Image: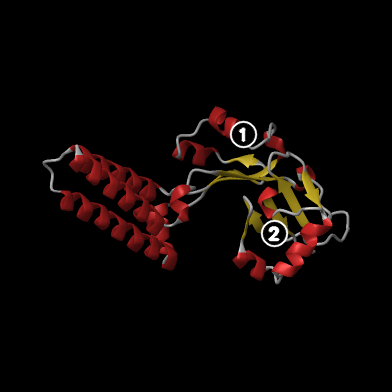
């Protein structure tokens, strides 16, 4: 019982480390070879936990080998287009210039109903509205609508707008993020002064606080759904 507990704990830590080493892309959009490696790692971890007779080091070596191979393959796909084409494949154009590319559908064994379903998922009900539809190497369908069907943007109307930038988190669950405060070129005196302006006398009352590029402070209090903005 204790042996299984120890092995499971160690393997859990090793699998988490392995996923982190392989990169964040492993957790979102997987290439085929990445999916295979993750499945194999999971299987190896399962076998090492269940089979007490199996030497623990064997599972660790096998998992380490898979991580090493994945890092090597990722490096090759990063540096070589030929390697990337062989290992990951190439995107396939299913709709080109508003026309369905039938030979690609047959090659990929995708029927019209499947294509229409994927387009509906992307909020396109009419094929006539689409200029290009591209099946990416990770299986995701990218859709580019025709110019007349694209949403209007400020640039289309020749309206100048300020860039919003990315808000910086300053307070999370009553704790100040010193690193982000410094990144935003702010200091504690500024923060406490802004809190006093909004009648906040205890920082522990704040669930979340952020600041935008215009130094506008936005606060959300604990047990309060409404935010307070300066």
What residue do we see at 41% from left, 53% from top? 88
The residue that disc 2 covers is 166
Badge 1: how crowded within 10 Å, few (<14), some, or many (20+)? few
As drawn, which residue projects farthest toward the front? 201
Whether the residues at callouts 2 and 1 have beta carbons within 8 Å, the answer is: no
Q: Position of residue 167 (x, y in %)?
A: 70, 58
When asked about the image quadrant of residue 17, the answer is: bottom left
- Secondary structure beneath dot 1 equals helix
Q: Is residue 9 left or right of residue 101?
A: left
Q: Is residue 181 left or right of residue 69?
A: right
Can you say which quadrant of the picture contains the N terminus?
A: top left
Q: Position of residue 205 (x, y in %)?
A: 69, 48
Q: Is residue 45 left or right of residue 165?
A: left
Q: Position of residue 221 (x, y in %)?
A: 71, 45
As drawn, which residue projects farthest toward the left? 53
Q: Which mark is residue 121?
A: 1
What residue do we see at 33% from left, 51% from top? 13
Q: Judge by depth and name the residue closer to the eye, 131 or 215.
A: 215
Q: How many marks?
A: 2
Can you say which quadrant of the picture contains the C terminus?
A: bottom right
Residue 10 versus residue 164 in the image, above or below: above
Q: Position of residue 48 (x, y in %)?
A: 21, 43
Q: Is residue 58 left or right of residue 115?
A: left
């Amino acid at each position: 019982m204790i042996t299984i507990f120890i092995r499971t704990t160690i393997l859990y830590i090793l699998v988490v480390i392995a996923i982190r080493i392989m990169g964040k892309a492993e957790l979102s959009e997987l290439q085929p070879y990445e999916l295979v490696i993750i499945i194999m790692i999971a299987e190896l971890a399962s076998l090492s936990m269940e089979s007490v007779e199996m030497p623990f080091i064997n599972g660790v070596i096998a998992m380490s080998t898979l991580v090493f191979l994945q890092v090597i393959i990722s490096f090759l796909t990063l540096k070589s287009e030929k390697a990337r084409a062989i290992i990951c494949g190439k995107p396939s154009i299913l709709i080109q210039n508003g026309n369905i590319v039938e030979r690609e559908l047959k090659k990929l064994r995708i029927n019209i109903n499947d294509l229409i379903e994927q387009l509906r998922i992307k909020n396109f009900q009419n094929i006539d509205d689409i200029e290009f539809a591209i099946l990416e190497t990770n299986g995701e369908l990218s859709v580019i609508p025709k110019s007349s069907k694209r949403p209007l943007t400020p640039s289309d109307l020749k309206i100048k707008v300020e860039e919003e930038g990315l808000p910086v988190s300053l307070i999370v669950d009553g704790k100040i993020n010193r690193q982000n405060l410094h990144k935003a070129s702010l200091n504690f005196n500024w923060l406490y002064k802004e809190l006093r302006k909004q009648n906040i006398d205890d920082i522990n009352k704040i669930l979340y606080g952020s600041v935008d590029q215009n130094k506008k402070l936005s606060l959300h209090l604990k047990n309060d759904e409404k935010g307070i903005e300066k």
